[in-house]
Amino acid sequence: MVIKNKYRLLFLLLMIFGFVSETIAQDTLSTLKNRRKQLEKEIEYTNKLISKIGESKSNTLYSLDLINNKISRRQELSATLKGEVYLLTDSISSLNVNLKKLDSRLDYLKGEYARIAYYASKNDNAYSHLIFLFSSRDINQAYQRMRYLSEISSYIRNEANRIKDLESVKEQKKDDLEGRIQEKKKTLDMEISQLSLLQLEQQKKNRMKRELSTKERTLRRQLNAKEKESALLNRKIEEAIAKATEKANRNTAGSKKISASDLKLSSLFSEDRGHLPWPVKNGIVSQTFGIHSHPILKHVKIRNNGINIATDKGADALAVFNGTVVSVMTITGSDIAIIVKHGDYFTVFSGLDRSLVSQGDVVQPGKALGTIHTNLQGKTELHFEVWKGRQYQDPAGWLVKK
């Protein structure tokens, strides 16, 4: 009986281990599926932005940025699908192992059940039971034998129910296995489809780069203008932040309450790192933070102190945290920039053609600050920066992951 209990315990532990492993794999698979859906949405949105540019204006750096974004998302999507296939393959193997264990356990239980049921059927009559009881040495042994007969009956019923339950579990596992096999086939088809689309997009990107490379003089002129605009924006941001900081320091000398308020706001902003809402309702990052090689001009580097977010025509820039507007300034005729103070932190929104707030306004997350400019090529792109004091930071690390 002790040996049987050991086998049952071992089987139970194996089943629990299998269940836990399968649950962990299922959670990871669920994460990959959610990421896949998000990537599909981003690719679909990028296609929408590209379609609005128009064929005659498609050979621009903005179009190239969108294509690059889509290729990057497509590559990640392909990798995600590979991950799903891997996990599904692992899950199918695990289910097959579990089914073999169930079959082995069922064979054992059925053998035990048949043996005991046969013994019980040979002795299952009132006369045999009476002889068994009356042949006892004393009343205590008779009682023990009566309990034994009752337990035999109960054990047979329990084993029958256990076999029935395990048969049900086995059928469920078989259904799960078939479902996973079909899901794997579907995912493999999707992966093949994504690889084909990726190849076509790479070809389109190469054609676009070849065509843009014939416009080197125009691209250098645009780059020079952009660099001047960026330097002007950076200088004005630093001036506005210095002015706002100086004002806060003057106020602190006369009121400790303001200093405490700024300190608290800075702390709350810092705690929200990685959870700030996006500064647009819909959008994709068309250029990331940092220094990048120019996509066409050789040996040319581009510095981005924030991120650029491509969005829909007519979209508004939205505040990402509680704060106060400390500056609304014009960089060029079609580029207005707005700076919002959050204690020691500042958020900068540029590329606007209309401001919806004024200096001194208090704003909350989601408040429309201004309308994002759309140029003649159909580009609607917000430039967004995050500063701590006079040091700019990578905004991607502050925004919530999509």
Image (tube, rainbow, N blue to C red):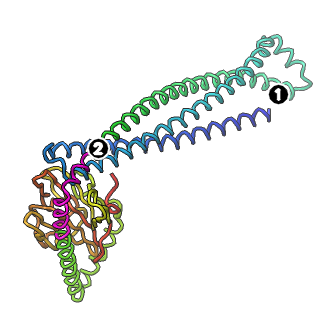
Magenta span: chief secondary structure: helix
Q: Residue 346, image x and y in percent?
A: 25, 71
Q: Crowdedness of circle 2 by 10 Å Cα count: few (<14), some, many (20+)?
A: many
Q: Amino acid at mark 1?
A: Gln
Residue at the left extreme, as displayed: 333
Query: What range is drawn magenta here?
Result: 206-228
| Count of numbered tags | 2
Q: Is residue 388 left or right of residue 351?
A: right
* Quadrant in which residue 361 is drawn: bottom left
Q: Residue 16, image x and y in percent?
A: 61, 39
| Picture layout, residue 323 above or below residue 312 | below
Camera-near label (2 vs 1) is 2
Q: Which residue is mark 1?
A: 144
150 or 82: nearer the viewer:
82
Q: Residue 68, image x and y in percent?
A: 30, 50
The answer to whether residue 33 is magenta is: no
The residue shown at (19%, 49%) is 59
The answer to whether residue 222 is magenta is: yes
Q: Secondary structure at mark 2?
A: helix
252 or 348: nearer the viewer:
348
Q: Is residue 317 left or right of residue 72?
A: left
The residue shown at (32%, 41%) is 40
137 or 167: nearer the viewer:
167
Could you tell which of marks 2 and 1 lies nearer the N-terminus? 2
The residue shown at (86%, 18%) is 132
Q: Amino acid at mark 2?
A: Ile
Q: Which residue is mark 2?
A: 43
